[in-house]
Amino acid sequence: MNNRSVRGLNLYSFYAILLPGIAFTIAIVPLLPVTSNINPLLAVIPLVAIGFVVGQGLHTIAVLAQGFAPRNEITTSHREFLIGLLTGKTLPFDHNISEELQKSCIRVFNASIESFDWNDSDRLDTDLSSNSEQEISFVYPIIRSQIHADGKGRSRVFQSTYAFSRSIMIMIPLLWLLYVIYAVLDWGDIPSQVLDRVGYGPVSQSLYTPIIDTISLDPPVIVISSTLLTAVGFLTFQSATKQYKQYYVEYTLADYITQYNSNVGETANNGSCRGGGASNGGNSTSGDDENGDDSSQ
């Protein structure tokens, strides 16, 4: 794996998985018992490890939720966004990709499909508009792999930001649910009542006193404030998810078109250089080729 691929992998892992996981872990610290003795310096490594695991969980939940949710401008995946663009179908939302970019993208994809060694007339037609969504979906990961191997362009930055916003959008309601459950249980003293009914007597406050209790916030205040923060945060990251998904798809197309045109230009230049060298003939041709090879390196 080259250095560009490693940087791309670390970028996505950091923004899309690690940061949401750390944010969720820190956000539930107020629910930990007061007796928890946490050394900030010694907690860094466990925080990173736990954050990565939690972040992967949030990422998985976000992907599953997006797959099962009814299709709209938020839940439509970036893959469906791009497939709808290439097949010319009406998408359930407006986008700002120009008609010229659409035409260029279809032209480039058609040429690339023709060049795939595994392709034949029975497998994938070069006219994208006549292909099914399943066939276009088969091509999409190959296109993404080419962009990733090239290691250039900005699409991966927007991909990471899009995945980060999506994970945070899922994280916020989960945190709200945890804090509301805590507030309801604390408000009605439900744990003590349940244990008292089964014969264990009331719960001693020393068994579990969360850090948030030391702030002296009433349960209604916790419910109201957490609900307001959840509404604002959810709407903010919902909008960010939609916007960065669009940016990601746009830059995926732009990066691929740029890469394709660059490769075509290099091929044309190499062909013209070889043709010019061949016209000189004999020893002169050999010398020109050697100089050309050295300079290209």
Image (cartoon, grey):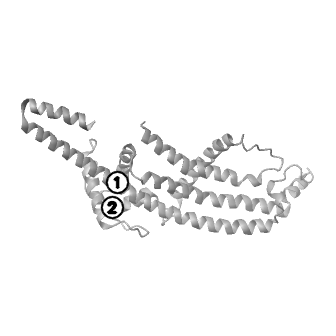
Q: Are marks 2 and 1 in contact (CB under 8 Å)?
A: yes
Q: On the image, which quarter does residue 271 sit in?
A: top left
x, y percentage for residue 48? 64, 43
- Mark 2 sits on what residue? 87
Q: Which of the image's four quarters has the C terminus?
A: top left
- Front position in the image: 296 or 92: 296
Residue at image position (64%, 41%) is 49
Which tag, 2 or 1, sits closer to the chain's start? 2
Tell me, yes or no, if residue 120 can be seen here: no
Mark 1: secondary structure: helix
Give residue 27's position: percent from left, percent from top.
69, 55
| Rendering quarter of residue 238 | bottom right
- Mark 1 lies on residue: 136
- Near mark 2 (Cα within 10 A), the count class, few <14, some 14-19 or many ≥20, is some
* Mark number displayed over residue 36: none
Kindly identify the amino acid type of the residue bearing the numbered disc 2. Answer: Thr
Point out residue 274 in the picture as x, y percentages from the top left corner: 14, 39
**Residue at (48, 43) in percent of width and height:** 9
Q: Is residue 265 above or below residue 250?
A: above
